[in-house]
Amino acid sequence: MNEISPPALSLHEDAFYQFFEPYRHALANSNCFGGIGLETYGTDLELVRTFDADFVWTVVDGCDDDCLYIASGCHFVNRVAYLLSSKSHFDLPILFRCGGRPSSLTPLGLTRQVNQLTRYMDQYGPQKIELS
C-alpha cells in the first residue's frame, strides 16, 4: 500500500487557538505562554509525558526569524514550552507562527485559515472505517 506523506501546513497562531482549543491543565506548575503553557522540565514535563502525543504541542524558537512556532508533537530541540489541546493533531506536520506580522488575523482571515485547516485535517487525518 502506497502512503503519501501529508505536506507540512503552516498557519497563524490564531487558527491554532480557534481550532485545537488549547487549555491550562489543572496540575500545571507554571504560568508560562499566556497561562496555558507547561514548562519543559520538572513536574510539568512529567505531566506532558503522561498525555497521548497527539494532544501535545511544542512551542519552539524559530531562531532565524525571531518568532516562536507551535509545532505538533513533543519536540526537544529549541523548545520553549509545551501545550495541551482538546483536539488531536494525529501527528500531522502542522506549524503555527507566533508573533511577527500580522500580530492577529482579521475575522475573515481567521475563518479562511480555520477552513484551510479543517480541509487539511479531513484530507490527511485518520480515515473513518465503516463497518458493514
Image: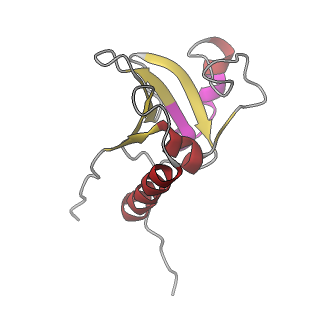
Write down the quadrant of residue 55 in the picture.
top right
The quadrant in which the N terminus is found is: bottom left
Would you say 33 lies left or right of 99 here? right
Above or below: residue 117 compared with residue 41: below
Residue found at x 37% / y 59%: 124
> Is 54 covered by the magenta stretch?
yes
The residue drawn where x is 64% and y is 24% is 34
Q: Quadrant of residue 52?
A: top right
Colour treatment of the image? secondary structure
User: Which residue shows up at 63% across the image and 22% down it?
Assistant: 38
Hey, which residue is sitting farthest left in the picture?
Answer: 2
On screen, residue 17 versus residue 123, left or right, reads right
Total marks shown come to 0
The one nearer the camera, 119 or 90, is: 119
Pinpoint residue 127: horizontal percent, then vertical percent.
43, 67
How far from the left and from the top, in percent, is residue 4?
23, 57
Q: Is residue 14 magenta?
A: no
Identified at 45% across, 50% down, the residue is 109
- Rendering coords of residue 126 (x, y %): 44, 61
Q: Which residues are magenta?
A: 46-57
